[in-house]
Image: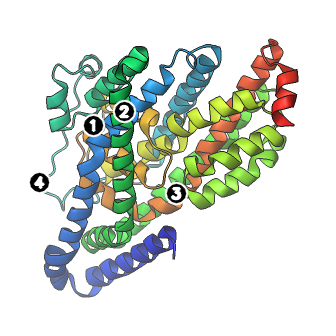
């Protein structure tokens, strides 16, 4: 039985249990929640929060080090990174717009039930921007100031790239540290069915059917935003910039899209993604072999959409108001986080915890979305790898148009 099925079972069992307690035994629920649901859910949340800072630090530093390689920061690298950053910003705009218009969180649904939570006043926009650079990175890590941690990680990664062989021991240490964090992510995801079940049982036991209705609206918002971004943003970019019929593009790349949906892993789908782009879409091997692996690391538009909608959803559920400064923080944090979001299942939830903390929302809000995240993870992985392929098509078209692709070498490489 794979992880998807296990989490779905945990979700269903937890949801049914919570609703039954809410409807028929509200007094007994308080006891069960105190001694079972809440402790199990809290342990799971603590496991997630435990690895957020080291995971972000190692992965973003390594991602920046990879991009900082002079050989990769040339013409193709600039186009690729520019495309990914622009589409990530568009994805966030789509997600935030849909969430703010639809308001899936039934504002205040849990606000009265959580007397310990008080929405923090958003700092001025310029203060948010200037505070990105940490005066004390160790203090930033200890206090979980995620934007500052991301900024410091980027500086370290760039330094690793520039110094090269002089610090290859440190780079190797970072790679090993990142491997340890990814192993722990896998371990934590194995207990996700139990944590998800306990969290959703606690949430529905407290809020009842109203939370279920809001959860359905949240899912529809994420799915709608993913579809809009895939069809409009990627389809339009492929047609206008890549000069390829979007229908041909999606038909040729469909095998990888289906595989991405099944695996929920951009990295795991990478071999088939590159094969589909090269053989079905005609992308040159030299462009595909650079753009798509880089995209599997730094292009996470689907995850960015989820983070934007989930943050607004959780804020609405808790009765918190997000100001312009908060929205800017979400965009900055989610965009920078996309650089280091690993292309494996489950990491999106860890990154969501980071975004929530950046705007002062409680990490417990993850309880409301983690139960259905595995389903949405499958869809957003397909969106992520589609963005990688769209970028490869566009960059390849530009390179061929300007005569930068050696057709003879390309034919030898593909023969």
Identify which residue, 412 or 153, lies in the foreground. Answer: 412
Of pointers 2 and 4, the one earlier in the residue sequence: 4
Bin the neighbour count of mark 4 within 10 Å (Cα to Cα): few under 14, some 14-19, many 20 and up.
few
Find residue 195 and report its horizontal and vertical position in percent.
31, 68
Find residue 312 and report its horizontal and vertical position in percent.
37, 45
Of pointers 3 and 4, the one earlier in the residue sequence: 4
Q: CA distance from mark 1 to mark 3?
A: 23 Å
Q: Which residue is mark 3?
A: 376
Q: Which residue is mark 1?
A: 358
User: Of discs 4 and 1, which sits in the foreground?
Assistant: 1
Q: Which residue is mark 2?
A: 333
Instruction: Give the colour scheme shown.
Output: rainbow
Instruction: Write down the quadrant of residue 58 in the picture.
Output: top left
- Whether residue 25 is situated above or below residue 105 in the rendered picture: below
Q: CA distance from mark 2 to mark 4?
A: 26 Å
Q: Which residue: 62% across, 50% down? A: 269
Q: Secondary structure at mark 4?
A: loop
Of pointers 2 and 3, the one earlier in the residue sequence: 2
Of pointers 2 and 1, the one earlier in the residue sequence: 2
Q: CA distance from mark 2 to mark 3?
A: 21 Å
């Amino acid at each position: 039985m794979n992880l998807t099925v296990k989490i779905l079972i945990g979700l269903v069992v937890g949801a049914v249990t919570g609703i039954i307690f809410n409807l028929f035994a509200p007094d007994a629920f308080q006891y069960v929640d105190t001694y079972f649901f809440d402790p199990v859910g809290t342990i799971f949340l603590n496991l997630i929060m435990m690895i957020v800072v080291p995971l972000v630090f190692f992965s973003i530093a390594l991602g920046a080090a990879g991009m900082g390689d002079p050989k990769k920061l040339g013409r193709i690298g600039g186009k690729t990174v520019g495309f990914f950053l622009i589409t990530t910003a568009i994805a966030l705009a789509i997600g935030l717009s849909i969430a703010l218009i639809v308001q899936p969180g039934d504002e205040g649904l849990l606000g009265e039930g959580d007397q310990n939570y008080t929405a923090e006043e958003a700092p001025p926009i310029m203060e948010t921007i200037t505070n990105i650079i940490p005066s004390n990175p160790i203090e930033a890590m200890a206090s979980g100031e995620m934007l500052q941690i991301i900024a410091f990680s980027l500086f370290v990664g760039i330094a690793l790239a520039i110094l090269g062989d002089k610090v290859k021991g440190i780079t190797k240490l970072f790679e090993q540290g990142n491997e340890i964090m990814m192993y722990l992510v896998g371990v934590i995801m194995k207990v996700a069915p139990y944590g998800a079940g306990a969290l959703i049982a606690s949430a529905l036991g407290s809020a009842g059917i109203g939370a279920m209705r809001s959860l359905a609206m949240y899912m529809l918002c994420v799915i709608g935003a993913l579809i809009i971004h895939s069809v409009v943003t990627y389809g339009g970019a492929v047609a206008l910039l890549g000069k390829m019929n979007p229908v041909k593009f999606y038909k040729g790349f469909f095998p990888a899209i289906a595989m991405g949906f099944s695996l929920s892993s951009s990295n795991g789908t990478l071999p088939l993604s590159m094969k589909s782009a090269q053989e079905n879409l005609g992308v040159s091997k030299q462009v595909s072999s650079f753009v798509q692996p880089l995209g599997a690391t730094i292009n996470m538009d689907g995850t960015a959409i989820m983070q934007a909608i989930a943050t607004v959803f959780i804020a609405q559920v808790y009765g918190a108001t997000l100001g312009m400064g908060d929205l800017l923080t979400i965009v900055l944090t989610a965009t920078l986080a996309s650089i280091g979001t690993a292309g494996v299942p489950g990491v999106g939830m860890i990154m969501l915890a980071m975004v929530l903390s950046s705007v002062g929302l409680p990490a417990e809000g993850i309880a409301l979305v983690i139960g259905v995240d595995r389903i949405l993870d499958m869809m957003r992985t397909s969106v992520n790898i589609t963005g990688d392929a769209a970028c490869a098509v566009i960059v390849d078209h530009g390179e061929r148009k300007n005569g930068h692709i050696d057709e003879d070498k390309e034919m030898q490489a593909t023969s």
